[in-house]
Amino acid sequence: MKDKKYKSIAEVSELLKINKHVIRYWDTKFDNISTRLSGNKRRFFSNENIKQLQELKNILYQNGRHNYSFDLAKKIVSNKYKKNDNSIT
């Protein structure tokens, strides 16, 4: 059971050292931050979701300081994932 496919918000919060309410807020602002299984309202996080959260955290905060505005961070992350999608096809 060590390598579960999905993690709960509590597990991700502890892993990334991000408060649960912050993860919930980011989930409302970004697409594909969490996965909802079979119409369930509970958030689950795959490894890819966790990587996105870590990148977002790294963009927004560095050395304990706020680096970018939330809107700019959103553009950086969305542009990065658009480039990755284009390189796959």
Image: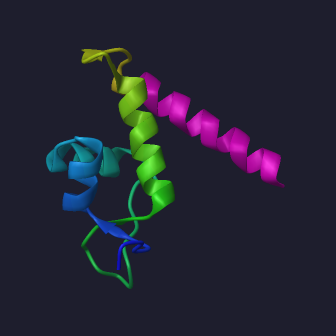
> Residue 88 at what x, y percent from top left?
80, 53
For image coordinates 56% across by 38% down, the residue present is: 78
Where 8 falls versus 23 (above or below)?
below
Q: Name the colouring of the figure.
A: rainbow
> Residue 24 at what x, y percent from top left?
23, 52
Indicate yes or no whether the magenta region holds residue 85: yes
What stretch of residues is rendered in magenta? 71-89
Where 37 falls versus 51 (above or below)?
below
Task: Give the farthest residue toward the right.
Answer: 89
Where 78 falls versus 14 (above or below)?
above
> Residue 30 at what x, y percent from top left?
41, 46
For image coordinates 32% across by 67% down, the residue present is: 7
> Residue 60 at what x, y percent from top left?
36, 25
| In the foreground, 31 or 47 | 47
Compared across the picture, whether 14 is left or right of 62 comes to: left
Task: Give the farthest residue toward the front.
Answer: 2
For image coordinates 36% across by 73% down, the residue present is: 2
For image coordinates 62% across by 36% down, the residue present is: 80
